[in-house]
Image (cartoon, rainbow, N blue to C red):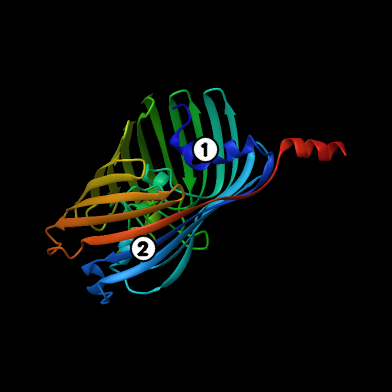
Amino acid sequence: MTVTKWMLAFVLPAAVWGQEAASGFELRTTLTGQGVYSQELSSPPRDGSAEDAGVRGVFYPTWKLNENWSVSGAVQVASRPFFDDQFKTQGRGVKTDVLRAHLTYSKFWNKKSVVIRAGILSTAFGSFLLRYDDAVNPLIDVPEAYGYYYADVTTLGLAAVEADATWGRFDGRAQFANSSPANRRSIFDSEQYGNWAGGVGYTIRQGFRVGASTYRGPYLDRKYRYYFRGEAPPRQLPATAIGLDAEWGGGPWNVRGEQQWFQMTYQLIPTFTQRAGYVEARRVLTPRWYAAARAGYVRSSAAPGYQTYEAAIGFRPNTIQLIKMGYTIQQGSAIPGARDNVFAVQFITSFRPVSVARDSSAAAGAAAN
């Protein structure tokens, strides 16, 4: 595996398309309908029915300018509540988020590649965001360290510049962003502080890769929920994260896992530390059926720890549709009974790319005329 998964996720589709077209526009789409049952929905502060339904659409436009330059992104439109961390918050509606929107320069050689991106990017920390799409994630929920609200690793995009490179079995990435993955700030928000993130990886053999990543920089703002009166200025309080990840695939099996350590600096109170990790496995049962499971945990210095266990069955009616049914169990000393357990069903449709392309031969002919 000489091209890292980061290239596969963000660059390779455009590169393959570029073999057929010198320039053009392409739009990929994933739509998800979801039904859930959880006592979280009927508990304060939401106080609604334990049953609910939601929809999510993710649109992936790519405008290829030439063989090296492109503009691409990912725009998410989702009802609320849809994600698990919204079950504990009030409000309904539909929200649009730009997950990615960036200008990309890419150059590929034999066993080497360089990709530079600037714009709205996913954080370079961790590995789960490469399979955040419902059609790619074999389960329904996400690992506990990831999320929208007060998570250690945001699933939203950051204003950033990033460089990725591969050389044989090695890959690496470096990113400078306008805010921390622990407290994502819009380019229109006040108190934006530069943060660094990056990672390295090594493919031991085909299907078996190990990696490490990190981020560091100020993470608080004065209106943040965990910024306390009398605390030092936010720019003097950095967050540091270190993560290890691994993936192995062979035959019908695919196994992934991450282990992460987080430290959020304070001066007024003790520094907050947290550990989180998970192991996830998927097994193909038949060409149409698979089973998947994930076990994870969170341990922190300021709150009771807990564990999560999720299992799911997936069925593919055809090449563009997927039906997933899953159940998540969350256990901890501060979680009474089955209150935080979630049963969910998802119906996912991945639309085939809609493209308007101009191939190199047509461009050459136009130039000649």
- Asked whether residue 143 is in view, the answer is no
Residue at the spot 24% in from the left edge and 66% down from the top edge? 38
Residue 93 has which mark? none
Q: In the figure, 321 relative to 225: above or below?
A: above
Residue 34 has which mark? 2
Residue at the spot 20% in from the left edge and 63% down from the top edge? 340
Seen from this angle, which residue lies furthest right?
369
Q: In the figure, 229 relative to 258: above or below?
A: below
Residue at the spot 45% in from the left edge and 30% down from the top edge? 171
Give the alpha-carbon distance from disc 1 to disc 2, as whole Å: 36 Å
Element class at badge 1: strand
* Residue 300 located left or right of residue 315: left
Residue 226 vs residue 299, the one in the foreground = 299
Residue 33 spot, x, y in % from top left: 40, 62
Q: Nearer the viewer, mark 1 or mark 2?
A: 2
Looking at the figure, which quarter contains the C terminus? top right
Q: Amino acid at mark 1?
A: Ala
Residue 283 spot, x, y in % from top left: 29, 39
Residue 79: quarter of image: bottom left
- Asked whether residue 246 is in view, the answer is yes
| Residue, disc 1 | 163
Residue at the spot 25% in from the left edge and 72% down from the top edge? 50
Residue 226 spot, x, y in % from top left: 30, 62
Q: In the figure, 344 relative to 274: above or below?
A: below
Residue 162 vs residue 22, the one in the foreground = 22
Q: Amino acid at mark 2?
A: Gln
Within-10-Å neighbours for mark 2: few <14, some 14–19, many 20+: many
Element class at badge 2: strand
Looking at the figure, which quarter contains the N terminus? top left
